[in-house]
Image (cartoon, rainbow, N blue to C red):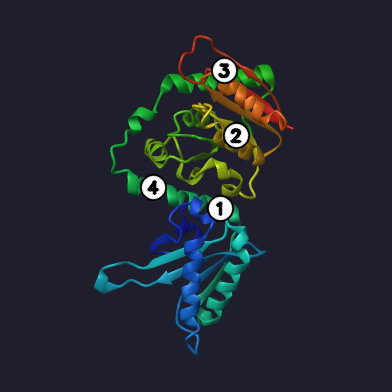
Amino acid sequence: MRLDELLGIKGDIVMAEPSYQNNLHINESLGLLRRIASDLTRFDEPVNARMIVIEDGKEAYALALYSPADDEEDCCETWMILTTALDSENQGLFEELLHTIRDHVKSDGVTTLTLEKTPFKDAIREYYSLKLMENLGKYALNPESVHNRPRVERIKELVGRLKKYSGIEIRGKVIEICCGNGMATAALHELGIEPICVDNDPYSITEGLLARTLKPERTIVADATELSRVLKGEEFDTAIGFMLGDIDNFNRPIWKQILLETMKVTKNGGNLFFTVRTEPEARFIDETVNKLAVGKVIRPDKEETLYDRWIYIGKKK
């Protein structure tokens, strides 16, 4: 659900932070709140303004500030949204500044909305995905190249075989790391699996969004080395990654961090499923997670020469 529908507001919506991952450290938001609070304290009486305080029954984790349309500048009404949904470290300071602002706004201009964080996070994921398509969709991307029917069918077959012969299945709440343009994600959708997809390449993500192999509300542009912060408070039944790599001697520390961060957001007993091109890459995955998981390396199809040649499958202890 889009943010405007979720919050029941009309007009343009602007997130204070420039990207989803910037919401892990809300520097822009805190700077803006400090300036607003400082300006308001100069007035002796409460001012006319509109704001929505969003809380989850425990804490106020988001604020929407209204700016009316300016006919002279030919702009429409706007809601600026600031949130600590991903930045719990600044929750105390955020609420302190929020209360200062609310105390200087007339009471009839303040609305309080109780809303769980999960749908709110889905909505801001969608917001940033739509902004990405708006900003990068004009470039020479090729969403048609994303659709690879033979690979989709092969992945569907692999998933079925793994469930039958090893008991490992992609089930429950699923996280897909390094999703790229969603070429492989398309197979999951056809199997009725709706993963949260993460990748740090905005151009690949945009291709997938335009090709509809990725879904705006379930896609995040973020650095997977910070995955446990990006997905703070969320746990997954299954963690997957198709065609991780290339994993070489130079970037192994980065891949180690990505894999360990993925383990942090996977539930105990959760299933793990990672594919790569070469056996050394698969062995590296096994060595990296073997203290946290029980798994094995297999080569399901010796005929395949390009995609998903080697697989690590396992369960988190």
Which amino acid type is marked by label 1? Answer: Pro
List x then y, in percent, for residue 102.
54, 77
Q: Is residue 73 left or right of residue 115?
A: left
**Mark 4 and mark 2: Cα distance apart in space:** 28 Å
Foreground pick, 201 / 166: 201
**Please, what secondary structure does the residue beneath circle 3 have?**
helix
Instruction: State the CA–CA distance, disc 3 to disc 1.
Output: 40 Å
Q: CA distance from mark 3 to mark 4?
A: 35 Å
Tag 4's secondary structure? Answer: helix
CB contact under 8 Å: marks 2 and 1: no
Label 2 SS = helix
Q: Of the residues shown, which amino acid type is indicated by label 3?
A: Glu
> According to the image, label 2 marks what residue?
256
Give the residue furthest to the top: 303
The label shown at residue 4 is none
Give the residue pinned by disc 1: 119
